[in-house]
């Protein structure tokens, strides 16, 4: 079981690995944290140039819905969470590992958002037909109704979890 680190949120609170490899022979420091914004979470890694002593530009992953920094049993830095658009199974599996109470409010809002979308989408049926430009207006209305339903379910979850 990996050790989860909920406090690594920025450069100052980052998890530090003191003996990070730099090239073939040198060692340096590396910092890792999870950056949380209203867009989602992303994994950030930054190393210190051992020749100059200056921190390199941070390397940031693409956004996922929710991430928590983790240290594997073998000592490797990794992340636990789920991507945007993840299905209910992936979200549930992540939430079995992650402590809901230790998530930030923004992360909890992401969980509400994606579980709401999954709930709405699971009740849809899809039908593929040849393109008909006259049907576009009807399709736009359907998409708007789907978005409204997901928004309603998201708000319900936010209220239930005192996030509004």
Image (tube, grey):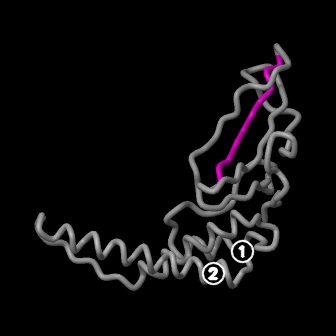
Task: Report the residue at 60% width, 83% height from top.
Answer: 156
The secondary structure that dominates the magenta segment is strand
Q: Is 47 in the magenta?
A: yes
* Looking at the image, residue 96 lies above or below residue 32: below
Residue located beneath label 1 in the image? 163
Task: Report the residue at 80% width, 34% height from top.
Answer: 30
Disc 1, SS: loop
In the image, is 138 to the left or to the right of 29? left
Q: Is 112 in the magenta?
A: no
Disc 2, SS: helix
Nearest the camera: 38 or 99?
Answer: 38
Task: Report the residue at 78% width, 65% height from top.
Answer: 1
Give the spatial CA distance, label 1 vs label 2: 8 Å
Q: Position of residue 137 (x, y in %)?
A: 21, 69
Near mark 1 (Cα within 10 A), the count class, few <14, some 14-19 or many ≥20, is: few
- Bounds of the magenta segment: 41-50
Earlier along the polypeptide chain: callout 1 or callout 2? 2
Near mark 2 (Cα within 10 A), the count class, few <14, some 14-19 or many ≥20, is: many
* Looking at the image, residue 51 lies above or below residue 155: above
Task: Report the residue at 54% width, 81% height from top.
Answer: 153
Nearest the camera: 9 or 1?
Answer: 9
Image-quadrant location for residue 102? bottom right
- Tell whether label 2 touches label 1 (CB within 8 Å): yes
* Looking at the image, residue 15 lies above or below residue 118: above
Q: Position of residue 71 (x, y in %)?
A: 79, 53
In the image, is 136 to the left or to the right of 99? left
In the image, is 141 to the left or to the right of 42? left
In the image, is 51 to the left or to the right of 130? right
Quadrant containing the C terminus is bottom right
Residue located beneath label 2 in the image? 157
Q: Position of residue 19 (x, y in %)?
A: 86, 33
The label shown at residue 134 is: none
């Amino acid at each position: 079981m990996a050790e989860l680190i909920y406090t690594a949120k920025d450069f100052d609170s980052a998890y530090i690995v003191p003996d990070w490899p730099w090239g073939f022979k040198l060692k340096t420091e590396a910092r890792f944290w999870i950056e949380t914004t209203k867009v989602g979470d992303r994994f950030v890694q930054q190393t210190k140039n051992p020749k100059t002593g200056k921190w390199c530009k941070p390397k940031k992953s693409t956004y996922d819905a929710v991430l928590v920094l983790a240290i594997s049993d073998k000592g490797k830095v990794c992340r636990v969470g789920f991507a945007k658009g993840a299905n209910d199974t992936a979200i549930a599996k992540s939430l079995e590992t992650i402590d809901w109470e230790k998530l930030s409010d923004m992360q909890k809002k992401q969980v509400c958002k994606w579980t709401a979308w999954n709930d709405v989408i699971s009740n849809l049926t899809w039908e593929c037909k040849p393109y008909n430009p006259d049907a576009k207006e009807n399709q736009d209305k359907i998409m708007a109704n789907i978005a409204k339903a997901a928004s309603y379910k998201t708000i319900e979850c936010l209220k239930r979890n005192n996030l509004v």
